[in-house]
Image (spheres, helix red, strand yellow):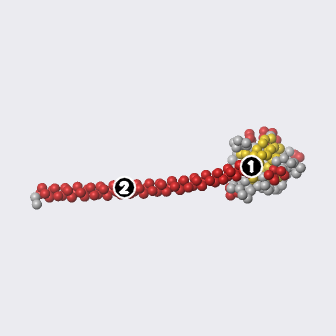
Amino acid sequence: MTIRSWVMALSIVVLFGSGVAFRRHENDRAMERIQQLTEELERTRTQLLDTRAALEDANKKLGFLETSKARVQVTAYALTDDFGPDPVFSNNTRARNAYAVPNHTLPAGKVLNVALSPTAERKLHASLNDTIVLLSRNHRRQHLARFVDRTVQTETRPVVDVLFADAHQARIWGRQTFYAVNISQPDSPFRLHTP
């Protein structure tokens, strides 16, 4: 064989080898990309399942709120000297720690102490220390409340009384109509999340 033939044969081998190496490199890159996309798809599927579960939970809670709500009249009262030096609620918590709501809004994590009338107690299937949610008609205002006391036992309307440590804040709150829901009921989807 001549040198020219050797050069041609060597060129063909190198060219063929380069093509095979390039194709192998491209296949490896494609397999790596497929692996990345597969992992991304799995993460997206997991997120979708989590989102579906959260949506189902939210729909269950919203449905519970809608079917369990009772219309109540919420009235604010101030903690005056008539209550004595160290008044307590029916559940033995100190009334002087009652939380006053400034400007109609309740900071996150704060819970109102409320007293229910016998009618409201029956309508809400409530027991002392149950957590009650007070919702405005348009659901823009929501307040968490703890059933800590009872109103006058002769009250026949569904009434909720809120005791404020400050008379000025009680006047600001005044008397309002709310929907109330007892989220501590045995069938409540909120039971695991009540404070």
Residue sitting at the far left: 2
* Quadrant where the N terminus is found in the figure: bottom left
Q: Is residue 97 visible?
A: no
Q: Looking at the picture, which amino acid does disc 2 mark? A: Arg
Residue 40 - label:
none
Residue 29 - label:
2
The residue closer to the viewer here, 132 or 108, is 132
The residue closer to the viewer here, 99 or 85, is 99
Mark 2 is surrounded, within 10 Å at the Cα level, by few (under 14), some (14 to 19) or many (20 or more) other residues, namely: few
Name the residue located 79 percent from the left edge and 56 percent from the top edge. 127
Mark 1 is surrounded, within 10 Å at the Cα level, by few (under 14), some (14 to 19) or many (20 or more) other residues, namely: some
Helix or strand or loop: what does disc 1 sit on?
loop
Residue sitting at the far bottom: 1
The residue that mark 1 highlights is 69
Q: Position of residue 17 (x, y in %)?
A: 25, 58
Q: Can residue 29 be seen in this view?
A: yes
Decide which of tag 1 and tag 2 comes sooner along the chain. 2
Name the residue located 80 percent from the left edge and 52 percent from the top edge. 123
Residue 174 figure quarter: top right
Residue sitting at the far front: 67
Q: Looking at the picture, which amino acid does disc 1 mark? A: Lys
Q: Position of residue 102 (x, y in %)?
A: 74, 41
Q: Where is residue 140 in the image (x, y as percent from the top left)?
A: 69, 42
Name the residue located 53 percent from the left edge and 56 percent from the top edge. 46
In space, the residues marked 1 and 2 are separated at their CA atoms by: 59 Å
Q: Are marks 1 and 2 in contact (CB under 8 Å)?
A: no
Helix or strand or loop: what does disc 2 sit on?
helix
Q: Please indicate whether residue 182 sits to the left or right of residue 35 in the image.
A: right
The residue closer to the viewer here, 61 or 194, is 61
* Quadrant where the C terminus is found in the figure: bottom right
